[in-house]
């Protein structure tokens, strides 16, 4: 899957997350530090959780920034932060839902 890099997930770009919710699923945003596909960068990737099947997958939509604060500022308002679990991949910084 080829990445679609957005400037942020606000305004018209919020449509991608809204479409997930319209289908009855859950949209969440995962922030990564230094993932393999974007070395030395922070990345926000939109994930979809399928409530009926109980599975989740990363969408092709992401935001690439130089700092954690820039990533946080790229998110839509009204989200709640979930800290990473010790069992998460070490490149995961935090999750927003």
Image (cartoon, rainbow, N blue to C red):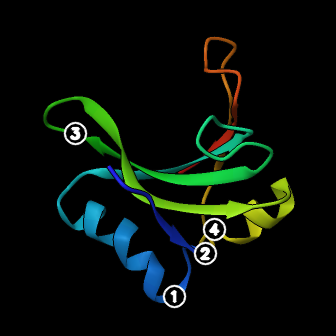
- Residue holding disc 3: 51
Residue 21: image quadrant is: bottom left
Q: Earlier in the sequence, mark 3 or mark 2?
A: 2
Given this view, does label 2 or label 4 mark the residue nearer the observer? 2
As helix, strand or loop, the secondary structure at mark 3 comes to: loop
Query: Marks 2 and 4, Cα distance to the nearest angstrom?
Result: 6 Å
Residue ID at (80%, 66%): 70
Compared across the picture, whether 15 is left or right of 37 comes to left
- Residue holding disc 1: 11
As helix, strand or loop, the secondary structure at mark 1 comes to: helix
Q: Residue furthest top?
A: 87
94 w.r.t. 72: above or below = above
- Residue holding disc 2: 8
Q: Position of residue 74 (x, y in %)?
A: 68, 71
Residue ID at (80%, 45%): 40
Residue ID at (61%, 68%): 78
Query: Marks 4 and 1, Cα distance to the nearest angstrom?
Result: 10 Å
CB of mark 2 within 8 Å of CB of mark 4? yes
Q: Which mark is residue 75?
A: 4
């Amino acid at each position: 899957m080829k990445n679609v890099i957005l400037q942020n997930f606000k305004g018209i770009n919020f449509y991608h997350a809204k479409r997930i919710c319209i289908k009855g699923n859950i949209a969440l945003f995962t922030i990564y530090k230094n993932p393999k596909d974007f070395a030395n960068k922070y990345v926000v990737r939109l994930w979809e959780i399928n409530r009926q099947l109980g599975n989740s997958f990363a969408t092709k939509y992401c935001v690439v920034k130089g700092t954690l604060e820039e990533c946080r500022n790229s998110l839509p308002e009204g989200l709640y932060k979930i800290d990473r679990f010790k069992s998460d991949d070490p490149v995961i910084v935090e999750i927003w839902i």
